[in-house]
Amino acid sequence: MSRILIIGSEGQLGSELSSFLSKNIEHDKIVLSDIRNNSSSDLTYQKLDALNYDEIKKTVLKYNISEIYHLVAILSAKGEQNPMKTWDLNMNSLFNILELAKNKFIKKVFWPSSISVFGETSPKNNTNQFSVMEPSTVYGISKLAGERWCEYYNQRYNTDIRSIRFPGIISSNTLPGGGTTDYAVEIFYSFLNNKDYKCFLNKETILPMIYIDDAINSIFNLMKENKKKLSIKSSYNISGFSINPSMIFEKLNKINESFKIIYEPDYRQKIADSWPNSINDEYAKRDWNWMAEFDLDRTIDIMIKRLKTKYND
Ligand code: SER
């Protein structure tokens, strides 16, 4: 029996992907791993350092892994505090997985890229798959380089590495850590705790976002598509909805009028300003029928519902 391995299973994407997969495939086909000692999930868990090729290879052989979801990265804002560490982790952990694929230890890989591959010289609106890409953060540079390497391995070694450029992901399971789009998650915690929210971006900053269920579905659908249909060998643009902080605030304020927001932009403003407002995802739509289901209203409803359930558990 072959299994799938999630590396980075305790993070924002990993924790939601593992709970989604556990509802859709047999539990003994899933192996979770992260740098932490333990997992909050009941699934098989292995502590793993994504920078250690031998350790990952051992795990792959031990559990007969055929597919890896490699979700380890230092995000855009945190990355700026330690550029070299970010470059090292983001790139060398990816190379470990690419090499395992090239050496035929595994058959298929999913690796997330990001809208951070775009920069100030990219078109702002409806940003195309092949727009100018001059990222200004070390995270964005590592994602763009990673994309080029994924394509290189796919073309040169016929590997099957699949990837999506994620917008900001709004989710309730775990807090994202160190991203520029994190405000769109944090604001819900303040709202439910009856606290004012101090927003680190200004009210007009429009960024592309996606609700986690759409993000997880996109991964699942891309991974099950016939490889022949995938014309993009690097990473697919996808789009959910575009919002600025005041759009979320206005809607939350309608639910509870005493909720307040204070805008105190910091160094993350510059990062956000370098990213697109909206994304053109025609290739994902055409190649693997991508379609987002959640808009801002649905996202707000479900976030409040899920976070309330989480608090009451
Ligand atoms: N959510 C990420 C970040 O803000 C973007 O991919 O860093």
Image: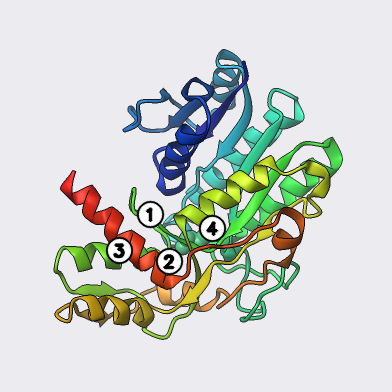
- What's the CA distance linking mark 3 and mark 2? 10 Å
Q: Is residue 256 above or below residue 152?
A: below
Mark 3 or mark 1: whose residue is earlier in sequence: 1
* Tags 1 and 2 touching, CB below 8 Å: yes
Q: Is residue 39 above or below residue 28?
A: below
Q: Quadrant of the C terminus?
A: top left
49, 105: nearer the viewer: 105
Q: Report the residue at 50% width, 50% height from top.
A: 86
Some atom of ligand 1 lies within 8 Å of the CB belonging to the residue at label 4: yes
Some atom of ligand 1 lies within 8 Å of the CB belonging to the residue at label 2: yes
- What's the CA distance linking mark 3 and mark 1? 9 Å
Mark 4 or mark 3: whose residue is earlier in sequence: 4
Q: Secondary structure at mark 4?
A: helix
- What's the CA distance linking mark 4 and mark 1? 15 Å
Image mark for residue 176:
1
Some atom of ligand 1 lies within 8 Å of the CB belonging to the residue at label 1: yes
Which residue is identified by label 4? 139
Image mark for residue 155:
none
Q: Secondary structure at mark 3?
A: helix
Q: Amino acid at mark 2?
A: Thr
Choose top left, top right, bottom left or bottom right for residue 100.
top right
* Tags 4 and 3 touching, CB below 8 Å: no
Which residue is identified by label 3? 186
- What's the CA distance linking mark 4 and mark 2? 13 Å
Q: Amino acid at mark 1?
A: Pro
Q: Secondary structure at mark 1?
A: loop
Choose top left, top right, bottom left or bottom right for residue 139.
bottom right
